[in-house]
Image (cartoon, grey):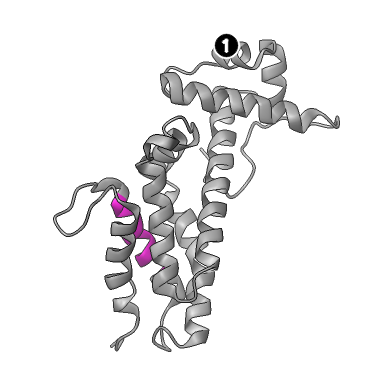
Amino acid sequence: MTDGLWPAAGLAEKAGPSDGDTAERLLDATERLVKQIGIGKTSMADVARAANVSRGTLYRYFDSREALLDALSQRTTDRFFADAGAAMDASPTLAEQVGKFSETMIRALHPGPDQFGNSRTAMIRMLMTQSPHALRRTSKFLRPYLQAALGRGEVRADLDVQDASEWLARMLLSFTVFQTSVAFEADDPQSVSSFVQRYAVHGLTGDGS
């Protein structure tokens, strides 16, 4: 599978003006099915029926089930990181920004009652807990925020931004694996955010020797 940074292999070339709408409709149908019956049971025939298109039309856009799921994963990751970026960009410090990332992630993994019907939560849960590319994508996403923090003097001057971005990514993604805690409420976005803000950036500010 792809990591959401490049177009999925197997996505057919399309030319008509309405092709983008059709592809989105197919992805919407796939997303609904993943939420309703799970990714393992979602077949190409199911998607074609749910989108009210022929199987031939579906295969014109996505030449395999893997290509379809890759495209859905890419769309879901793009939306998740757009949401996280919007929250982080409104925060002035790296600690607060990393806290906002954790908030966005926990809201996705533990949706409230008013979000239960949001099919994107099922896809984000799958992505953040199972994707082998989550670390790479998250690390790359965090890098500009670390670079900006370096310019503001929030972290030590000799900080290796690439190493630090991987450290933060590993720490943040650990919350998707270890979902219980004695130090904070693991399903409460604000509690997790507060915990992250207290400790996550601490190791990036002191003597690096």
Percent coordinates x, y for residue 9 in the rendering: 62, 36
Total marks shown come to: 1
Percent coordinates x, y for residue 42 in the rendering: 48, 18
Q: Residue furthest front?
A: 114
Magenta region includes residue 181? no
Q: Residue at x 54, y 41 (%)?
A: 76
Mark 1 is surrounded, within 10 Å at the Cα level, by few (under 14), some (14 to 19) or many (20 or more) other residues, namely some
Percent coordinates x, y for residue 93 in the rendering: 45, 76
Please say if 149 is above or below 168: below
Q: Residue at x 34, y 74 (%)?
A: 201
Does dot 1 land on a helix, a strand or a loop?
helix
The magenta region covers 165-175
What's the residue type where badge 1 is placed?
Ala
Q: Is residue 8 visible?
A: yes
Please say if 204 is above or below 178: below
Judge left or right: residue 183 versus residue 50.
Answer: left
Dominant SS of magenta comes to: helix
Res 59 → quadrant: top right
Judge left or right: residue 61 versus residue 113.
Answer: right
Please say if 112 is above or below 188: above
Res 14 → quadrant: top right
Q: Residue at x 39, y 39 (%)?
A: 125
Q: Nearer the viewer, residue 143 or 2?
A: 143
Q: Residue at x 30, y 65 (%)?
A: 194
Q: Residue furthest right?
A: 16
